[in-house]
Amino acid sequence: MARLRRGEVRPHEDYGFFGPGSVVWKVWGYPTAPTVGFQRAVVVEELDPPLVAAVHGTQGVYQRARTRYDRTLRYFAMVAFAGSREVCKAADILVKVHSKAIGELPYDSGTYDANDPASQLWIQLTGWHSILYAYEKYGPGKLTEGEEREYWEACAVAAELQTCSADDVPRSRAGVRAYFEEMRPRLAASPIARQAMNHLLRTELVLPPVPRWAKPVRLAVARTQRIATIATLPRWMREMAGIRQSRAADVLIVPVMKAAFALAHVNPRVELHLLGLLSPSTVQVVAPIKLGLRPRTEEVLTPAEARARHGYAKPVEAHLEFRARQATRVFGDREAPSDEGLVESQEVLGPLS
């Protein structure tokens, strides 16, 4: 990644939905978020049968692992840090992208739809929980009671940008734990789930190409992150998915990662450089915050205020005709869904290749 100059970074239009001093900026701004936290989220997600069916159906995670990681991380970073107009636009186009991920369940009767509110709630909670879990395990530690309440309230705010309902988001650690216990009987480590989980644990697939002399270092970094991510998974989940790792590795990786992340967090330019190796498209989202650039308007909005101001529908109500046409193509005409939303998304979420 080329050296980032302050003058090349554009400030956001406003503070979006959280802003400086928020626990979201504190947790999502720590280097555990785009690394172990995000990798854990996308690995755990695959245990949900409808979601992994959507992932398997599109094949994007296998055909373009690096750009898929880049685009998805950029979206989550936008929700946390970007201006309200940008985020509303990204949330709106994501509904069209997800309209492509529909089909029939491969291991059960029924269908899947990436825009289904239940699937979106699963993505939302696994994402926010994993980011917090990694922060607590490899970062500064547990939040205060007040900060944790604020964090889960913020998760509900962010859920308004998905097709799920904010009312379904738990507002406490106990509530989140109860949600995952409720989901546990519905989870399954099908062949495609195991395939996706093991594939997503291969950090080397999302790292940039390097000269031959640097390949051992690249492999060591990837291996270390894999160990750190697996160490965050509960034993029952590892056994279900056939993922093996010793208890010694689980213990020994903690001080290594805590020290590495603390060192990276000392200098925001180092953080941005490392982020650029994993997700180039995310750098411009995070850079204004890391470099202390104030937005053009110093205000924080709610999603409802932002949609009214910028002219966007609620995600659950967005692009209903387009989604219906996609369903007709797939379930009625037995054709592949249109790539229209995916192509259109490149301007907002980054290139596909």
Image (tube, helix red, strand yellow):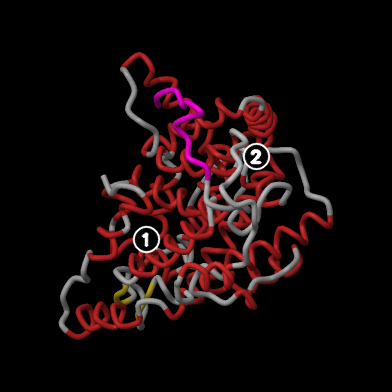
The single residue placed furthest to the right in the displayed view is 145
Asked if residue 325 lies in the magenta stretch, the reply is no
- 317 above or below 26? below
Marked residue nearer the N-terminal end (1 or 2):
1
**Magenta stretch, residue numbers:** 1-11
Main SS, magenta residues: loop
- Mark 1, secondary structure of its residue: helix
Q: Position of residue 60 (x, y in %)?
A: 30, 54
Which amino acid, by three-letter code, is at mark 1?
A: Pro
The single residue placed furthest to the bottom in the displayed view is 332
Quarter of the image holding residue 228? Answer: top right
Q: Position of residue 290 (x, y in %)?
A: 60, 36
Mark sitting on residue 229: none
Give the residue at mark 2.
247
Give the residue at mark 1.
191
Asked if residue 4 lies in the magenta stretch, the reply is yes
Residue closer to the observer: 41 or 7: 7
Of the 4 image quadrants, the one containing the N terminus is top left
- 142 above or below 248? below
Residue closer to the observer: 238 or 153: 153
Which amino acid, by three-letter code, is at mark 2?
A: Arg
Residue closer to the observer: 289 or 23: 289
Left or right side of 228 for 21: right
| Residue at position x 58%, y 46% in the image | 295
Of the 4 image quadrants, the one containing the C terminus is top left
| Residue at position x 44%, y 76% in the image | 116
